[in-house]
Amino acid sequence: MNREPKHAVQRRLRSHGLKARKSLGQNFLVVDSVRDAIIEAACLTAEDTVLEVGPGLGALTEKLAASAGRVIAVEIDPSLALKLGKKLGGYRNVKIVQADILKQDLNALVGGSSYKVVANIPYYITSPILRYFTRAADRPALMVIMMQEEVAREVTAPEGRMGFLAVSMRLFSNPEIIFTVPAASFYPVPRVDSAVVRFNMLPGPAPGMGDVDDFLEFLHCGFASPRKQLRNSLAIGLKIEAAGADNILRRAGIDPGRRPGTLTLEEWSGLYHASGAKRC
Ligand code: SAM
């Protein structure tokens, strides 16, 4: 394993009067082979525009710049953004933007072109980041994202075991775990292992869903109490009697005694339509 000594990352931070900020999810990747495998998973060419979330000290950024046509890296920490801007000043195809990714106009950021997201993201905002990119009008063509292994397993759960996150991501993509990454690959060492997930994005939301926001709101109601039977979970979510939920489920041809996690995306779609698109 080609590992940058952890003390070297620590020294680099210290020499700039910096410390890893836990509150910003700063766990820096220190293993080159992991970086290389992430970049390989994104199948980059000189035609690609890459949006990197949270470049930090640039563990991925420089290699991304060498593999893609253009890299836009959005870093919230002003000190890191400044330091990285100086370090990568020689790369004319890299732009460092100091900002919160969740407040960006994606179309303006990438200049209207198609783009791929490649990132080791801050884990504390994994769900908001996934939501942000999948609900945006200008969705990426592909996402290769390092996240907490447990969340990666949740996102990529197979049909029959899909929670809210898995169903909502299946609306927009086919997600797959590419490889897992031990906690020791980062400085500081986090408490959890990680995994790299590739989201092969669909050209649009899965067909037959109707209003996507409304569908997701309904889905949220369906998972109101995921351990309970669907008749009860749905009744709690929709704030109706269990008998009403029973009727909706029977209209959709779904056994009310099943658990929410056992439904396929198509079954959720059928249930949504049978409900008369009722919101919580
Ligand atoms: N990519 C680097 C690496 O692999 O070593 C750093 C990854 S670290 C897990 C996450 C990075 O995201 C940190 O640099 C952190 O400052 C940055 N970050 C945290 N919240 C952010 C936000 N809302 N928008 C943009 N960057 C953010």
Image (cartoon, grey):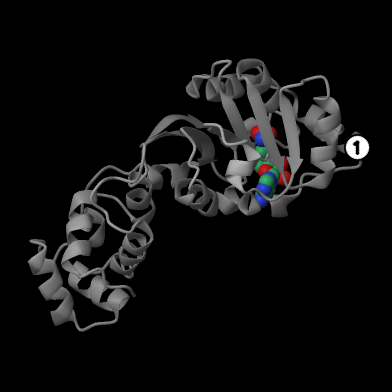
Q: Where is 203 relative to 179, above or below?
A: below
Dot 1, crowdedness within 10 Å: few (<14), some or many (≥20)? Answer: few
- How far across and how far down the image is residue 180, in percent? 48, 31
Report the front residue among 274 and 42.
274
Residue that protrudes farthest toward the bottom in the picture: 241
The residue lying toward the viewer, choosing from 243 and 259, is: 243
Whereabouts is ligand 1, in terms of quadrant? top right
Would residue 140 be seen by someone viewing this image from the given angle?
Answer: yes
Q: Position of residue 49 (x, y in %)?
A: 59, 27
For this orientation, the residue located farthest to the front is 112
Which amino acid lies under the numbered mark 1 shown in the image of this protein? Answer: His
| Residue displayed at 16% across by 62% down | 258
Q: Quadrant of the N terminus?
A: top right
Q: Is residue 235 left or right of residue 95?
A: left
User: Residue at left 33%, top 55%?
Assistant: 163
Position of residue 136 in the picture relative to residue 18 (left or right): left
Q: Quadrant of residue 164?
A: bottom left
Whether residue 105 is situated above or below residue 38 in the rendered picture: below
Task: Kindly identify the residue that appears in the image at 49 percent across and 19 percent down.
Answer: 43
Disc 1 secondary structure class: loop
Q: Is residue 256 visible?
A: no
Q: Quadrant of residue 52?
A: top right
Expressed as whole percent of the image width and height from the top left, the position of residue 277 reads: 25, 68
Left or right? Give the position of 129 relative to 17.
Answer: left
- Which sits in the foreground, 8 or 157? 157
Residue 83 figure quarter: top right
- Is 75 rendered above or below residue 31? below
Quadrant of the image containing the C terminus: bottom left
Q: Which residue is mark 1?
A: 16
